[in-house]
Image (spheres, helix red, strand yellow):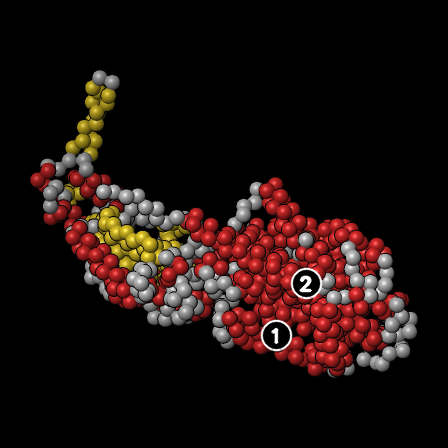
Amino acid sequence: GYSLKVWGDWSKQARDRLDLLSRNGIIGLLLVFGVLGLFLDLRLAFWVALGIPISVFGTCAIMLLNDATMNVYSMFAFVMALGIVVDDAIVIAENVYAHRLAGKPRLEAAIDGTVEVAPSVISSVLTTVIAFIPLAFVSGDMGKWIAVMPLGLVAMLLISLFEALFILPCHLAKCRLPAHPAEVPLFQRRVQGAVSGVIDRLYLPVLRWSLVRPAIVLSLSVAGLLIATGLYRGGYTPFVFSPQLDWEFVYTYIEYPKGTPNETVVAATERLNEAFLEVEREHLRPGGQTLVTTSTRSVGRSGSRDRVRGDMYVEFDPKRVFQQTSSQEIVARWRDKAGDFPGAERVVFWGLDQSPGGRPIELALLGSNIDELELVAGEIKTQLAGYTGVYDIQDSRGPGKWELQLKLKPEARALGIQLEDLARTVRGAYYGEEVMRLQRGRHEVRLMVRYPEEERRSLHQMNEIRVQTPAGEEVPLPVLAEVSARRGYSTIRRVDQQRAVTITANVDETLGNAREIAEDLRQGVLADLMQQHPSVQQRWEGQQEQARRSFHSLMIGLALSVFGIFALLTLEFKSYGLPLIILAVLPFGLTGAVLGHLLLGHPLTLFSLFGAVTLSGIIANDSIVLVDFINRRLAEGVPLQQALLDSGRRRFRPVVLTTLTTVAALLPILAERNTQAQVIIPMAISISFGLLLATLWILLLVPVLFGLYYAVVARTGQLRPEWQVRTNDGPEI
């Protein structure tokens, strides 16, 4: 009997991705609450964590009003924001907690603690919002995919800011927080004692040492950036457009020219199937479980192309395949087992992964001379075949039907014969020429005259065709033209009114790098071919073009973002120098991002860059509050070095805590091995590892840069008025 089975259900992938991120989001939320409860009072941690669901629900409402969809990128924005949205609440709650431990009443502690840090918290959140602007500027296919991400992040941050400034203090004013260190629970006293020990015995001595040796600290910081640059330029952390995902669906086809016996195509398809079954037996799991859920085969015409082909679809079971091997390895083994197919024009193994951007290698050649385009395309395909990891090299020409082509001889031009005359004569001989029209009732009938059927059956009869010259003389066709038989084209593609031939190829990123291959082509054989054939133009498409467009637009957005952050901080600090201290720290987060990719064995991708942009906002967030505290201490008349040390001591706990909450929220994503998470893992790596290392730069480099800035303005006599009180009491830095 017959049975109906669903194949190629892409909604299943969407459900799996949403379930994956929902599960990791819940785990991340629990980890964030655990970190907060470890370093803060449990009641304080509860009220801080309460801002997360409030921000999520508010963001969902805003997305609904903007017709934004809930997809893998908006869900990842929620997961990523779990640790970020509590940053402002942590700063306020920790400061309220400090005021409460100083003996203030609950209401007074809530008001004073919130008001003291409110300006810097507002600036830090707005800075983070501005840092997300470049993600909204990304163009191309990738920009369309992630357009919802900055919307979700910005909405969550602004809602969390409102909650932290107006709702959280109300809860803390009624919360029974300890009014004295002795009232703190024993476990938390031990944790806080351990943290204080790290601050007093490790951090402050290192900070004190760094303040008197700024040149060494700056040299080490720059060295870290140079190491990260060297790892990238040296190919240890290569850049790819998007990570190579495991395929759940594989589409394989063999194309033969028209007229190929059906038995040949069927036999080739059967051979494909036998090769796959052999590979499947090699990877058979204990218990006889197969690697696939569905496989189909078919034989028929090749769509609009004048060819026949055999197709085979395979749907892998991700729970069985991706835990022990990759689908790319299985397909590569399948390709080797299948071998060559004599007479086949194309043999393609194509993974369907729904990634944006097209093929890794996709180059369009434009020109008016099709023969020249074919020559250049052949040279490029030969060159591509020599690169390791490049496979499925194709072009868009596609041979069509056989046809006779006529080329005028010089004798024809001498007799006044044009190519149009030949075409009209041959058409009249085989198709016919209209001699009159007859009226039959309401219909008009055209009367056509052509050669008798027996003279049209053989191409040899073409030699007997006579062409009339302008002088009235009839000359045999072979005297006037060269007649040749060749294949035509099934499709003729034009771009900007020029004929175009597109060359495509896939790249196994474990063996080769598409960006490096494309760059080598540009500087090598492609440059030489363009010089030899000046009428041919090149145009990169696919992932290379998408990466270029996305990177270019991202850089424009990043420049606007940096300018916006600088303008905002200038208004906040009423200074041009202090914002430069904060901006100077931002690039050092890239060191941790690159090292994280190296340690986890992931290549850099566009999502890695998106993560680095997001990271800059988080780094600026923590740096702003630290600079604000130093500024306040100086305004209180505290000597410079003491102000730097006091601010470092006060800000150590919240800076480390915001880092740990952000990393904790992303930790489930980093540990995920499911193929659905591979797209967003590079972004999580950039944020988590970059933030871990950037925390060190924030706690050490910001005070060092502040000290250097202070020394410069002091020597030039441009000290801020509020700094000129008791500034000479401390040791010179």
x, y percent for residue 247:
39, 58
Going from N to C along the chain, the mark reached first, 1 or 2, is: 2
Q: Which mark is residue 37?
A: 2
Residue 691 relative to residue 706: left or right: left
Where residue 151 appears, as percent x and y from the top left, is 61, 50
Q: Is residue 548 visible?
A: no
In the displayed orientation, state which residue is furthest to the right: 725
Front residue of 694/732: it is 694
Outermost residue toward the left in this view: 454
Q: Residues within 10 Å of mark 1 (few under 14, many from 20)?
A: some
Q: How many marks?
A: 2
Residue 460 point in image, percent of width and height = 11, 48
| Disc 1 from disc 2: Cα separation | 35 Å
Residue labelled with disc 1? 225
Query: In the rendering, at what x and y percent does residue 201 appear?
Result: 74, 80
* Res. 103 image quadrant: bottom right
Q: Is residue 411 above or below residue 424?
A: below
Q: Which mark is residue 43?
A: none
